[in-house]
Image (tube, helix red, strand yellow):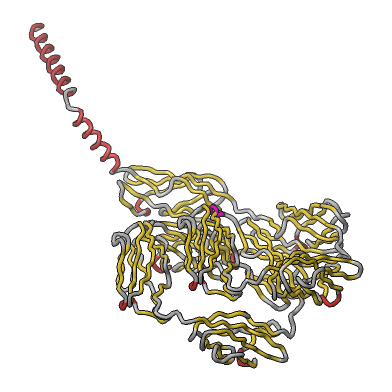
């Protein structure tokens, strides 16, 4: 029996050794394949959520989508639960923020689990002042405007205090400057505090000042020196004027007339006060090409227009030949500059053998910076002017900023539109996303009973027409109301302000109205016969784009099919009858030929990027008002109806085809989806 048992044990041991040796002899590749198979099985049964964390404000909602084994599943097929319903609830994947705190949302499907960590914050009001730094003169008053939770707060509702009543006092937000020095004004409301730094300067009483103390002129020019005494405008006829050199410049009631090249000093005296103005008169700029600016600073993506003058008259940009020393920094077309990248470059303009150069510096993008196109504006009572803003390098609609004026009796502001109310100076303040920009406004006396022409020098080509626009008493005057005449009808004729160029030469057009007269100098040049030109000579495109090149021959429009077209590189751009199609990244030259004339167009094609963007990712609207969100994909405008829209809080803001409507005060998040891309827009309803 023992012998038989021993044989069985030996047989068992041998079998185990054989099986073990067979197991360890499986090739490595087979082991790898087995591991891949196990990983694939595991991946095919993985449950994933579109987000793993969410930061929300009380009242917000957020939709969570699920995938199982790489495929989308309906959220309603999963089992959802929350760790703390007082913080966040969940139904079919939609999370609703209930109160401040943290909670974990859990989704279960087919035995698998995924979690989302949710943080909810309470929405708190913020107290802000329209200005946090104010400069005043003893005796002046100024009003501090407050906002709480985005809405205007009446000054009487806040608690106000001053750190030094001998410098400035405050009552319901109205500051009164008492004496020279600095002080801090504090406003408090519902536990929130804001401080305003105030500087009071000495009174500028009985001081005579000139708007300009250095003036550069050209022989034959006139210029007016504006004076102020005791802080108020002083009529030129009230002062005593003199010149140190009448052969250079003369003066009468503040009006300077340049007589000859050189330097001179103009002196104005009033009530024992004296101010001096240094005047430089240069040679006449006849037959000289000049640019309004010879040094330009830009930001990548910006455009700027260079204005030219030839022989003292405005020259249309398309008439000059333009070039750039570095197209990677800045390009130019008909005088319009486009900033391409950081660096320095020289723009050259040529016309009739004359050359002018413009130095261009392109800086890095000014992200998150609010800037105004003008920071100093001079107006006349009754005039309106619009302040254009940019934020983050892009144009900002005036209605999106918060505007205020330091003195509504001088100038008011609404959505960036200024209205001059009365003589004086004031500061306009614009605020957006915590950034502030200030515009100094000066309103002068009304220019009553004065006839003015928009242009006093005009250059034309035989056969051209041009319209002279007039203003009288600061208001537009219809051309038919004035009496018009020409000094030489063989050069130019005029009818109700419309000029018709008849032949080469110069002539003077005279307009008269209510005893006032204005003269316009007209130069008519030879016709540009038998010349082929393109409206654009440099074009930037994205792959897949098309663009039509328009031609003119002998000054008249030429149909694209009449010209012969060719491309230097069909892999970059092709052309047919003037229609260019971008094929691939690179540069190519398109050539158009007609009646032995040729014109070349430089084409630059960039790779397109699948990117979804909106014109503003944060908007503020009032209850009942609407605002349209503009969407671009790959740099091209997308119709709002083609985008899938959703709102986190329909009780606050609803959206349809990109049009957002404010329903009630609060905050919501609008989501736009297109071709797999998604972008969020934060909405505040006031």
Residue 125 at x, y = what percent? 65, 55
User: Along the horizontal axis of the image, is 225 left or right of 238?
Assistant: left
User: Along the horizontal axis of the image, is 184 left or right of 62?
Assistant: right
Of 265 and 214, nearer the camera is 265
Vertical arrangement, residue 282 with respect to residue 492, above or below:
above
Q: Which residues are magenta?
A: 363-367
Vertical arrangement, residue 145 with respect to residue 38, above or below:
below
Vertical arrangement, residue 582 with respect to residue 469, above or below:
above
Residue 406 visible in the current orientation: no
Residue 209 at x, y = what percent? 82, 66
Vertical arrangement, residue 659 with respect to residue 527, above or below:
above
User: Along the horizontal axis of the image, is 211 left or right of 431?
Assistant: right
Residue 644 at x, y = what percent? 40, 63
User: Along the horizontal axis of the image, is 457 left or right of 540?
Assistant: right
Seen at 34% across and 66% down, the residue is 590
Image quadrant holding the N terminus, namely: top left
Residue 110 falls in image quadrant: top left
Residue 602 visible in the current orientation: yes
């Amino acid at each position: 029996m023992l012998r038989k048992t021993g044989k069985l044990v030996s047989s068992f041991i041998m079998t185990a050794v054989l099986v073990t040796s067979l197991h360890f002899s499986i090739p490595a590749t087979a082991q790898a394949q087995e591991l891949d198979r196990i990983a694939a099985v595991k991946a095919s049964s993985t449950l994933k959520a579109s987000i793993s964390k969410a930061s929300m404000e009380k009242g917000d909602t957020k939709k969570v989508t699920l995938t199982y084994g790489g495929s989308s599943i309906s959220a309603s097929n999963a089992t959802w639960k929350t760790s703390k319903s007082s913080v966040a609830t969940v139904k079919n994947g939609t999370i609703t923020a209930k109160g401040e705190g943290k909670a974990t949302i859990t989704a279960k499907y087919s035995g698998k689990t995924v979690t989302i960590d949710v943080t909810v914050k309470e929405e708190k009001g913020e107290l802000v002042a329209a200005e946090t730094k104010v400069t005043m003169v003893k005796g002046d008053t100024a009003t501090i405007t407050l906002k709480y939770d985005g809405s205007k707060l009446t000054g009487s509702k806040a608690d106000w205090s001053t750190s030094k009543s001998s410098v400035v006092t405050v009552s319901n937000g109205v500051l009164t400057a008492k004496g020279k020095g600095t002080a801090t004004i504090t406003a408090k409301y519902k536990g929130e505090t804001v401080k305003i730094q105030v500087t009071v300067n000495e009174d500028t009483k009985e001081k005579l000042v000139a708007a300009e103390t250095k003036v550069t002129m050209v022989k034959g020019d006139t210029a007016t020196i504006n004076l102020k005494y005791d802080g108020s405008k002083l009529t030129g006829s009230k002062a005593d004027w003199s010149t140190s050199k009448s052969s250079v410049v003369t003066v009468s009631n503040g009006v300077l007339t340049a007589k000859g090249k050189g330097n001179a000093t103009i002196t104005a005296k009033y009530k024992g006060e004296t101010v001096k103005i240094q005047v430089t008169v240069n040679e006449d700029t006849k037959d000289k090409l000049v640019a309004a600016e010879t040094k330009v600073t830009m930001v990548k993506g910006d455009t700027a227009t260079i204005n030219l003058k030839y022989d003292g008259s405005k020259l249309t940009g398309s008439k000059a030949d333009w070039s750039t020393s570095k197209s990677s920094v800045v390009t130019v077309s008909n005088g319009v500059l486009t900033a391409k990248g950081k660096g320095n470059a020289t723009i050259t303009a040529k016309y009739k053998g004359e050359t002018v150069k413009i130095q261009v510096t392109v800086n890095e993008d000014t992200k998150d910076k609010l800037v105004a196109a003008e920071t100093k504006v001079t107006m006349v009572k009754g005039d309106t002017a619009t302040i254009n803003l940019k934020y983050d390098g892009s144009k900002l609609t005036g209605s999106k900023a918060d505007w205020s004026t330091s003195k509504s009796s001088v100038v008011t502001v609404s959505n960036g539109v200024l209205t001059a109310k009365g003589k004086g100076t004031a500061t306009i303040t614009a605020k957006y996303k915590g950034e502030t920009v200030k515009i100094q406004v000066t309103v002068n006396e009304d220019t009553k009973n004065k006839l003015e022409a928009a242009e006093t020098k005009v250059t034309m080509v035989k056969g051209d027409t041009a319209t002279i626009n007039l203003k009288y008493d600061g208001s537009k005057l219809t051309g038919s109301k004035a009496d018009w005449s020409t000094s030489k009808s063989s050069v130019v004729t005029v009818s109700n302000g419309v000029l018709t160029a008849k032949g080469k030469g110069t002539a003077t057009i005279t307009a008269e109205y209510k005893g006032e007269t204005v003269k316009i100098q007209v130069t008519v040049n030879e016709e540009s016969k038998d010349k082929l030109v393109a409206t654009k000579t440099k074009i930037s495109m994205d792959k897949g784009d098309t663009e039509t090149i328009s031609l003119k021959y002998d000054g008249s429009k030429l149909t694209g099919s009449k010209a012969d077209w060719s491309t230097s590189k069909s892999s970059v751009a092709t052309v047919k009858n003037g229609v260019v199609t971008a094929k691939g990244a690179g540069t190519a030259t398109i050539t158009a030929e007609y009646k032995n004339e040729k014109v070349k167009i430089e084409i630059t094609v960039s790779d397109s990027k699948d990117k979804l963007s909106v014109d503003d990712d944060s908007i503020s609207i009032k209850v009942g008002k609407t605002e349209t969100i503009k969407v671009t994909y790959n740099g091209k405008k997308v119709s709002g109806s083609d985008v899938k829209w959703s709102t986190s809080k329909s009780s606050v803001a609803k959206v349809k085809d990109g049009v957002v409507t404010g329903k009630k005060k609060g905050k919501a998040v609008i989501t736009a989806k297109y071709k797999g891309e998604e972008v969020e827009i934060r909405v505040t309803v006031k």
